[in-house]
Amino acid sequence: MTHTYRRTLVTTALPYANGPVHLGHLAGVYLPADIYVRYKRLCGDDIIHIGGSDEHGVPITITADREGISPQDVVDRYHKMNAEAFAKCGISFDYYGRTSSAVHHETAKEFFAEIERKGIFVRKTEKQFFDATAGRFLSDRYITGTCPVCNSPGANGDQCEQCGTHLSPTELIDPKSKLSDATPELRETLHWYFPLGRYQKLLEDYVERHSGEWRSNVVNYSKTWLNQGLAERAITRDLSWGISLPLDSVEAQGKVLYVWFDAVLGYISFTKEWAERQGDPLLWKRYWQDPETRIINFIGKDNVVFHTLMFPAILMAWNDERSEGRYELADNVPASEFMNFEGRKFSKSRNYAVYLGEFLERFPADTLRYSIAMNYPENKDSDFSWVDFQNRTNGELADTLGNFIKRSVDFTNARFDAEVPCDLSFDEWDNLGIDWLESFCRLEAAYEGFHFRDAVSQTMDIARFANRYLTESEPWKVIKVDREAAGRAMAVSLNLCHSLALLLYPVLPETSNRIWRMLGFEGTIDDLVEPGKVVWRKALEPGLKKGHKLLGTSEILFTKIEQKDIEPELKKIEALLAEARRCEASEKQTTTTFKPEITIEDFQKVDLRVARVIGCEPVKKAAKLLKLKLQVGSEERQVLSGIAQHYKPEEMVGKQVVLVANLAERTMRGEVSQGMILAVEGEEGQLFILEPQGKSINGKPVE
């Protein structure tokens, strides 16, 4: 069993400082990163964990406008709130920064200036919506209108919340300004674009080099974008809140860096600020510009392309023509799937969420860390439920782990004067029934492969073994006839307590430190970790010698969660679900209302035809759209339909559908749609296309 100790930089996606973080954020990014970092610290690695708040962007200005405060007030509030929640949950950042800091502004401007100096940016004059009443250009989030895909009112200028289609503001039907409710007008404005396509081949090589080690979702998302061909992407916006361009020209006035460009650079600026705190301002270069450093970006799946394509492209642009001061690219990007809440997606906009800070006011952090780790959404979406949380806390933590630790310590305190009764030989330890070498190999492989649910499950298996061992050894009975045998059983149990304290530290740090203190050690396990000092392997062998003195007292590690403890939460769920359904009903207008009356002559103008799907594929950059190739009698048509979340492309081929054949053509996402197919929405929001049955009906009218 070998282990390579190396320098590692771990970064975590920057939470938006526009609201509190919820359990979905914790599960997808921050807890897995913290578990990994704590494990590597035990291994003696030189590792730092860098995170912070993303404090620029339109949603922050919208919140400020709505509340009548400044954007700085908004980010100050939520940065503090989220930093405190992370600390209370045991997320052990080495540094937690802010993109509103002076160092970050300087870093982002430096990157812009360097890339501008090299002539890489493309400048484009384009037409954007302008609110004449408010006297300002409108970013996409300041524009609302009717979605051109699903006809839902209230779609934002960047995406329709109802059908999920990514939009541009000019695609909206009847657009309105959120500032004044006026109809905006198109005016010319100049913007800087980053030519991602310039780095297409380098990015393809980068992704391909890691395709055997990155998670499949990361590789697939990245290759999908690459296969579509990378286009130019705007990196400036007309806003007052953000990082101003480091240019003196008139055309640069009133423009700031687009948040997608500046936020990822926070990883670098925060590392610089960390280095300053260490008293070595140049120390950050060791983690960003040394090929010997391994960089790992923990993110959610919605951030994949920003970290596998866009951020690397920015670094490639910086590295162009440089022999020194070159940035290294991430070695791995462990992107999680989503954690849902009681079967539904977390939604801040609908307040359907469990917020981290509020949760920790009622329940201990380690119980949450364990429950989420055991449901870690590694390869598919998972779910958090209060009942599962209660069952895991009561059964696995309280009845198994907590019960074993307390019985071992209490019996030793009472019957052996709080001292380890005897030494254990390595043969005795190896013959307990645990193959320590194999177990450690599997456990380390799980951690190194970012399989955190598997790692925590394996560790809990050792706790289960320990609990069974103590129960079956029955030292409380054996001591009456054979004190030495009872003492040997307790020596085994106490050494298992010692091993478990170390093994559980990555996921249950507070609990591990409490066990550590009960075992009579001064300080905490946190005090033991330092680069080059291997603490992890101490769990592989007996760590307590004969005569080692315990603290002499014990404590209950986990208090069981009663039904009355979660009853308020269950009622809150009912209220949230009711509110979510009410919002959905309002948004979808599901009440029984009818459109204005028409005559039979009006209806006869609609030409409904049976068509057969002869081809189907996704629409680029539109997660909810499928492009259907239809055979309608002797004619072929192309139709775009927002059913991608309900039907796979291969499922559609061969189906007969009902086509509105005389609907005027329209263009969406650069594709022409020659009609519309009919579908009906089910109770849970699923769509069912209408499938007429029968032979030789293709092209026939529906009457």
Image (spheres, grey):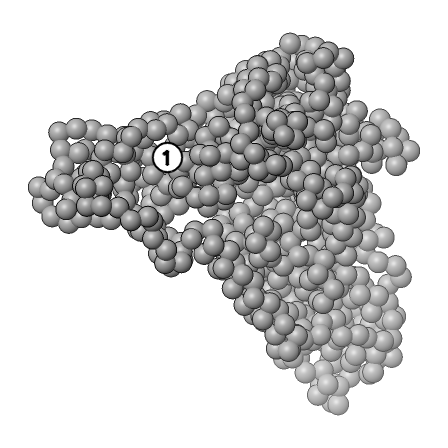
Front in this rendered view, residue 22 or 19: 19
Residue that appears at 87% across and 79% down: 417
Q: Is residue 458 visible?
A: no
| Residue 112: x %, y % from top left | 70, 19
Q: Total number of numbered labels?
A: 1
Image quadrant where residue 697 sits: top left
Image quadrant where residue 101 sits: top right
Q: Is residue 567 visible?
A: yes
Please, is residue 547 above or below residue 229 in the view? Answer: below
Please, is residue 496 above or below residue 355 in the view? Answer: below
Direction from residue 210 to residue 623 in the image, left or right: left
Front in this rendered view, residue 611 or 113: 611
Front in this rendered view, residue 420 or 343: 343
Residue that appears at 60% across and 13% down: 123
The local crowd at label 1, few if under 14, some if 14 to 19, many if 20 or more residues have their Cα within 10 Å, is some
Direction from residue 319 to residue 586 in the image, left or right: left
Direction from residue 670 to residue 83 in the image, left or right: right
Please, is residue 305 above or below residue 191 in the view? Answer: below
Please, is residue 189 above or below residue 168 in the view? Answer: above
| Residue 391: x %, y % from top left | 58, 71
Q: Secondary structure beneath disc 1?
A: strand
| Residue 103: x %, y % from top left | 81, 29
Q: Give the labeled residue for mark 1.
A: 618
Residue found farthest to the bottom: 480
Residue that appears at 34% across and 53% down: 594
| Residue 31: x %, y % from top left | 66, 51
Direction from residue 52 to residue 571 in the image, left or right: left
Residue found farthest to the left: 696
Residue that appears at 60% across and 29% down: 131
Q: Could you tell me the amino acid type at mark 1? A: Pro
Image quadrant where residue 617 sits: top left
